[in-house]
Amino acid sequence: MVIKSAIEILSGPEEVFSWIENPNKAKIWQKGVQSEILKETPEKIGTAFTEILEDNGKTLVIYGVIKDYTPNQSISFQLESKMHSVFVNYSVEKKMAKTILSIDSIIKWKFPTNLIFLFIGYKIKKSILAQTNSELNELKILCENRNG
């Protein structure tokens, strides 16, 4: 499953990117996420971490690794859980006084979730996209309030 989303933010790329690359700042706009760095590398690529997602009393542990990193431009993660494998890329692009933040994700569901996805995949995708857009709007507010 492919999920793509983008948002225009009235802020510089450096400000927007700082909210993505810094786990402590990311927890503010990504609701229900707790994270812990397991192994940090100076160049960021190879940094390993765990995230614990809590939603409606359910918990999901995700193991992640930074796969690609260009300061103030893009960061990519490989995420693994018992339910899925996810590759996600965040990129920022300056456009006049705004920054375009784009998120591209590829989600591969594991058994038995992949069977469930066959029947209600459109609902799952719609839910993920709604959550992503909600989080991006929260990030937009945080970044724009810093500038205003």
Image (cartoon, rainbow, N blue to C red):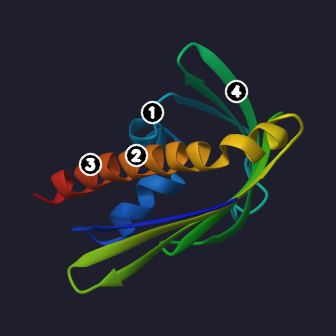
Asked if residue 70 is positioned above or below residue 82 in the image, the reply reads: below
Inter-mark Cα distance, 2 to 1: 7 Å
Q: Residue at x 34, y 63 (%)?
A: 15
Q: What secondary structure is found at the residue carrying circle 1?
A: loop
Q: Residue at x 67, y 47 (%)?
A: 121
Q: Residue at x 30, y 85 (%)?
A: 95
1 or 4: tag closer to the N-terminus: 1
Circle 3: residue type: Leu
Q: Nearer the viewer, residue 109 or 50?
A: 109
Callout 2–callout 1 Cβ contact below 8 Å: yes
Q: Label 2, on which residue?
A: 135
Q: How many residues crowd around disc 4 within 10 Å: few (fewer than 14), some, or many (20 or more)?
A: few
Q: Nearer the viewer, residue 141 or 83?
A: 83
Q: How many residues crowd around disc 2 within 10 Å: few (fewer than 14), some, or many (20 or more)?
A: some
Spot the residue most to the left: 148
Q: Label 4, on which residue?
A: 60
3 or 4: tag closer to the N-terminus: 4
Q: Label 3, on which residue?
A: 142
1 or 3: tag closer to the N-terminus: 1
Residue 31: assigned label: 1
Question: Does residue 80 appear in this view?
Answer: no
Q: Residue at x 25, y 76 (%)?
A: 98
Circle 2: residue type: Glu
